Amino acid sequence: MAEEHGGRRYRLVLTASPLQGHMTPMLHLATFLHSKGFSITVAHSELNRPDPSKHPDFTFVPLQDNLSVTADFSNAVQFLQALNDNCRPHFKQHLIQIINEQKDTSVKESVVVIYDNLMHFSGSVAGDLGLPSIILRTSSASFFPAIKIIPQLHQEGRFPVTDSVLQEIVPELPLLRYKDLPFTGLPIEYTLQIINMIIPKTPPSAILWNTLDFLDPSADTHIRDHYQVPIFTVGPLHKIIPTPSTSFLEEDTSCITWLDKQAPRSVIYVSLGSLANVDDKVSTEMAWGIANSNQPFLWVVRPGSVKGFKWIEFLPEGLVNEMNGRGLIVKWAPQKEVLAHFAVGGFWSHCGWNSTLESMFEGVPMLCQPFDLDQKVNARYLSYVWKMGVEVAVERGEIEDVIRRVLVSKEGEEMKQRGMEIQEKIKVAISHGGSSYNSLNELVKFILSL
Ligand code: UDX
């Protein structure tokens, strides 16, 4: 039962997106807000549903999305359009039902919508019904100026970028090179459509950002300049409150038993997140580099993530023999537990924002292999600004070299040191009186003021 706040109850309706890297922070936020006495409803697509049994205190509302069979994440514009168009009517109907039900109760209930920025229909439905709405952004703050500038660069003839300027600094964003900008290499119309979708037009009442003030203050300025509403930087949400596993795929916990038997900081953990699809030639080079480095490894190969293969059939037999005994390949790992394990010395990652925050919190140096979206920006910050990561090459000899640099060299030691410093700062930020701690308390007050 939700607590009353000043004679009024609050029902928060959270709309979560069906992507792993978006669902997880939303459920962490929901768990935190529930601990503060708010009633929680999670509206979600039928595709990639959260598990209600893990959150018995929440109400779950599946929205009919008609996507389960046809979902094609590779065309983001089509996917997001269909997701938003299809979920909208049912969401509106559900909110109207909540509003009508509360008319018959003696205790007044305020309804506030909190939505993932990819689920922008929620903001517009809330606006139609006169309800306040708050956006949760699950990517890094530095990503925002990097996408916001693209339409301007396009108008000035500087985007799409040409090969000759890829290594040059973008003058307006001095920490980034042109090659770090998102969507380089994609058709410009498609790029502009995506940007339009991820910088929604409906102004929210506030924005929550799963990041920390100290990581990128300049991005923070860009955001506050653009949105004239309160911004709360509340990350890293995965460390704010314990939350049951939010994985869509089953976690293979046998890897923890295997890690227990390895030497401290000796293992390279490899995982390219929940969406990336990799060419089999690239994956084979990765495998040779890992094998030749002679370091123990834990490699997550998500089923279907290597194009044209169900799982690890792309590995030549000789290579499997080469790798046998030195490592483990699993389909999905309990990643936060893995990164917190004493045996893990480096994380080869696509640099999705959740993976980046999780690695930073454990002080684990990263090998950065970004694909697109915010990943290239995150990778640049990891290697150039926060100095706890290195860029990974695609050729086996270079891969072997980079693994050794991170795990067994002075450079790796220094990155680990930087990682520990960042970990310490994050701990301060989420402790009593820290920036994220204060921001979350301000958020609670803000919601109660709506
Ligand atoms: C996507 C985009 O790729 C990313 O750039 C954006 O910031 C968020 O959405 P995703 O590919 O899912 O993200 O990566 P990431 O944000 O890192 O999230 C992956 C999540 O899956 C992490 O929380 C990680 O802990 C979890 N995970 C991954 C596991 O639990 N087990 C695994 O084996 C691999």
Image (cartoon, helix red, strand yellow):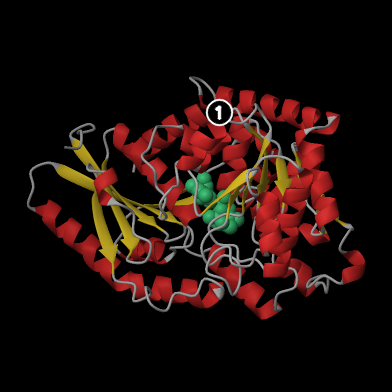
Question: How far across and down, in percent of the image, does residue 447 sit?
Answer: 36, 40
User: Where is 309 relative to 292, above or below?
Assistant: below
The residue furthest top is 432
Q: Is residue 205 visible?
A: no
Q: Is residue 288 visible?
A: yes
User: Where is 363 relative to 385, above or below?
Assistant: above
Question: How far across and down, in percent of the image, does residue 368 sit?
Answer: 72, 49
Count numbered badges in the picture.
Answer: 1
| 64 left or right, relative to 221 | left
Q: Quadrant of the N terminus?
A: top left
* Closer to the camera in the image, 331 or 388: 331
Q: Amino acid at mark 1?
A: Ser
Q: Which residue is mark 1?
A: 435
Where residue 394 sits, quadrant-wise, is: bottom right
* Closer to the camera in the image, 357 or 346: 346
| 102 left or right, relative to 399 | left
| 418 left or right, relative to 209 | right
Q: Quadrant of the C terminus?
A: top left
Q: Residue at x 76, y 72 (%)?
A: 154
Question: How far across and down, in percent of the image, does residue 324 sit?
Answer: 64, 49
Q: Residue at x 59, y 48 (%)?
A: 353
Classify mark 1: residues with Cα within 10 Å, few (<14), some (14-19) or many (20+).
Answer: many
| 46 left or right, relative to 431 | left
* Closer to the camera in the image, 166 or 365: 365
User: Where is 189 relative to 45, above or below?
Assistant: below
User: Considering the numbered disc 1 on the image, is that residue within a helix, a strand or a loop?
Assistant: helix
Where residue 364 sits, quadrant-wise, is: top right
Question: How far across and down, in percent of the image, does residue 146 sit?
Answer: 70, 57
The residue furthest right is 164
Q: Residue at x 51, y 20 (%)?
A: 433
Q: For the residue with label 1, is its CB less than 8 Å from the closest atom of ligand 1?
A: no
